Amino acid sequence: PSDVARITSGQVITDLVSILKELVENSIDAESTKLEIIFKNNGLESIEVIDNGVGIKKEDYDKICLRHHTSKLESLEHLETVATLGFRGEALASLNSIANLTLTTCTKDDNSKASQLKFTSMGELKETKTVIGGKTGTHVKITDIFHNLPVRFKSLEKTIKKEYNKAITLIISYLLIYPQIRFSIYNHNLATGKKNLVMGTQGLKRSTTLDSLLAVFGSNGSYGLVPLDIDLKDLEVNFRLSSGVFPVMTTLNLKFEGYISDKSFGMGRSSSDRQFVYINRRPVTNKRILKTVNEVYKLFNHTQFPVVVLNIVIDPQMLDINVTPDKRTVFIRHEDLINDVLREELSNFYNSLSI
Ligand code: ADP
Ligand code: MG
């Protein structure tokens, strides 16, 4: 199989959540510090993501929507250590094939002349229009989602509110772990003609995850939070290879950082929708790690779900990011082991906390 085949593991865009995920990640990868996201009718009508990142260079215009075009992965050797969130070059191509995509972009060298780009369904550049007075950054607008997939559109139409809420939760997960980026999220209700600010950190002066938690969830979401900072260097661990009889010793560096509720967190405040887990700042859905957190917490508090923003920092060699198309399920080598370490360290952490 070619390199391209190896980094392709299926369809990227299957629902509203994956659309938002790909667009937000692209803006983060472009080093944006400001991100505006506008839904129209919960996203059914249109979705816009406007960033102030580096923009797209003119010489890339004709490639940007072609499958497997990426400016981020130099060679496959880098796959294990990629620092950017995207690396497959599939998202825009995929989006463009299921929706109507308009891209307006401007780099700092474009002298405030932005270009508005449109593409054929095959991803070839179809139209370039110059827009005067552009700001550096990229504006992606998507309309007519699933216009060529009527069954999928019907299903989206039925579940749009749920999908929209899931998308908001996903955006929050990025907002919390990238506090240096100012987010504002709007939903434009076509029936009432109102454009409502759903949430945001645009008004924040400081930039910490804690400030963002407060901005988004209010006092309930930030009540009794304590910083988590467990730094394990050269941790000696034994593990057994699936093929081997004897345990093998290895050392690893592992960090658990973020915020978690202290023991004072009371009934009525507990809620499972304020729990965010990341691996190397990549939001992941890892039920197992969350279960461990909740189990340990329950030993110290009668409520079940602490507010938690947990970033696990781990050597990229220990990860297999390229598993599911959306990269949210990240496989960790020796996951058992890391889970055990987390359980022990978190117990120690709570034991040493006075409240
Ligand atoms: P990937 O993120 O895997 O590289 P995408 O299909 O998501 O692939 O994007 C293709 C390319 O388009 C990226 O590599 C990047 O060069 C460019 N791009 C997409 N979105 C943005 C953005 N918001 N700002 C700057 N460049 C972007
Ligand atoms: Mg991408």
Image (cartoon, grey):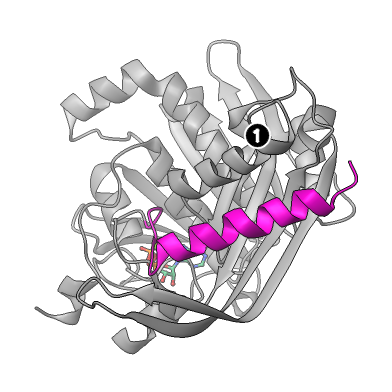
Report the residue at 39% width, 60% height from top: 330
Residue 264, image x, y percentages: 84, 32
Residue 159 versus residue 29 in the image, above or below:
above
290 left or right of 198? left
Residue 99 versus residue 334 in the image, above or below:
above
Q: Nearer the viewer, residue 209 or 260?
A: 260
User: What amino acid does circle 1 point to?
Assistant: Lys
Residue segment shown in magenta: 327-355
Residue 342, image x, y percentages: 59, 58
Report the residue at 85% width, 38% height from top: 224
Which corner quadrant holds the C terminus? top right
Is residue 131 in sight in this rendering? no
284 left or right of 256? left
Asked if residue 183 is among those painted magenta in the image, a careful observer would answer no
Residue 44, image x, y percentages: 41, 27
Q: Give the labeled residue for mark 1.
A: 298
Label 1 crowding class (10 Å Cα cut-off): few <14, some 14-19, many 20+? some
Q: Looking at the image, how many numbered discs can be counted on the residues?
A: 1
Residue 220 versus residue 108 in the image, above or below:
above
Name the residue at the left extreme. Answer: 1
Report the residue at 70% width, 33% height from top: 199
Asked if residue 338 is among those painted magenta in the image, a careful observer would answer yes
Quarter of image, res 88: bottom left
Quarter of image, res 129: bottom left
